Amino acid sequence: LFLVTGMTFVLVTFAMAVFRRYQPGSAEKMAASKEGLLKVMMDLQRSSGGLVIIALSVVAAASFFKYRACLHSRRWVPWVLLGTIVKILLIINLLNTGIGFIARYLTNALVEKHADEVYDWLT
């Protein structure tokens, strides 16, 4: 569980860095808001919580590599499949969450009749 959480944290951090590089205006608008996934992740990266997640992921990976000799029998295959399914589910949930935040920002901009914000989100 810690390994999947750490991998997801690193993936989201990488995606945010790419988003911030190619869409800096939109990324800063999302970060300036009082809530949102980008704001939560940026706060987590700046706090000790991000280091705790990474440390637990390293511990999980180290324990896996330490006991990999015990996995020479083919009993580990179902666990790899289960881990892959869990990772895919987490990625799908992450995408749904991101789409939800973007839809909310678009809806709020439309309701408040801010055409420039709507255009920024659509481009």
Image: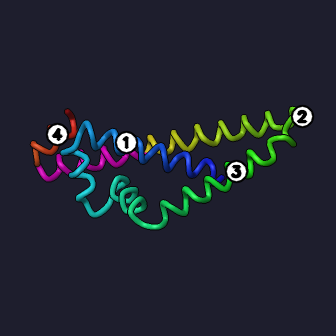
Q: Earlier in the sequence, mark 3 or mark 2?
A: 3
User: What is the spatial separation of the Cα atoms under label 2 and label 1, in whole angstroms?
Assistant: 42 Å
Q: Which mark is residue 123?
A: none
94 relative to 78 in the view: left or right:
left
- Judged by depth in the image, the label closer to the viewer, 4 or 2, is 2
Nearest the viewer among 94 and 111 is: 94
The reply to whether discs 1 and 4 touch (Cβ–Cβ < 8 Å) is no
- Between discs 3 and 1, the one toward the N terminus: 3
Tell me the tag on residue 73. 2
Q: Which residue does the image show at 47% across and 67% down from the upper left?
A: 48
Q: Amino acid at mark 4?
A: Asp
Look at the image and say whether residue 107 sits in the magenta stretch.
yes
Where does label 4 land, which residue? 120
Q: Is residue 119 left or right of residue 85?
A: left
x, y percent for residue 21: 27, 40
The foreground one among 115 and 120 is 120
